Image: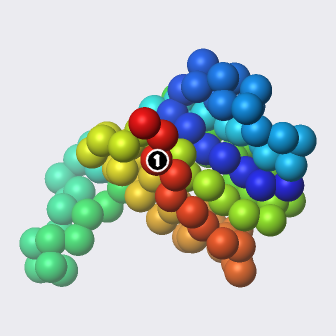
Amino acid sequence: MNLVIVESPAKAKTIKKYLGKDFEVLASYGHVRDLVPKEGAVDPANSFAMKYQVIERNDKHVKAITAKLKGADALYLATDPDREGEAISWHLYELLKGKRVLKDKPVHRVVFN
């Protein structure tokens, strides 16, 4: 099974119609992380490293993506081809890498026009 991530549930439903049974399509429901809401979100003493946290309302979606990815052969990040979509894909990739669920799974960036 291959896991495809898009931004919205409407897109997930539409794209699922075109992909075969070897693909599972889930939505991130928009952004999944944000800077921590307090002083110290950016560390100027450490090359301006930023500290992120999962957005509370999207925690359940991140958990669903993580659970499905454990049984997947590959991950396809198919968020929108704009800066917001790129940010969502980057944050998802970093989160999943940090959870060590990517292992040796190939990760692909998909752009729909």
Measuring 61% from the left and 44% from the top, which residue is drawn there?
5
Specify whether residue 70 is in view: no
Drawn side of residue 27 relative to residue 56, left or right = right
Q: Mark 1 points at which residue?
A: 111
Q: In this view, does 21 lie above or below 91?
A: above
Q: Quick one: 49 or 23, which is closer to the camera? A: 23
Drawn side of residue 19 relative to residue 28, left or right = right
Question: Furthest-right residue in view?
Answer: 21
Drawn side of residue 44 relative to residue 22, left or right = left
Assess disc 1: are there few (<14), some (14-19) or many (≥20) residues with their C-alpha within 10 Å of its C-alpha: few
Measured as percent of width and height from the top left, residue 39 is found at 18, 53
Q: Is residue 88 above or below residue 27?
A: below
Measuring 80% from the left and 46% from the top, which residue is drawn there?
23
Drawn side of residue 27 relative to residue 30, left or right = right
Specify whether residue 87 is in view: yes
Kind of element beneath mark 1: loop
Measuring 66% from the left and 72% from the top, which residue is drawn there?
106
Q: Quick one: 75 or 58, which is closer to the camera? A: 75
Q: What residue type is labelled 1?
A: Val
Point out the image quarter for the N terminus: bottom right
Measured as percent of width and height from the top left, residue 113 is found at 43, 36
Q: Quick one: 48 or 74, which is closer to the camera? A: 74
Measured as percent of width and height from the top left, residue 42 is found at 18, 62
Measuring 76% from the left and 38% from the top, which residue is drawn there?
19
Measured as percent of width and height from the top left, residue 110 is found at 52, 52
Question: Furthest-left residue in view?
Answer: 44
| Rendered image quadrant of residue 103 | bottom right
Q: Is residue 100 above or below residue 13?
A: below
Q: In this view, does 57 lie above or below 32?
A: above
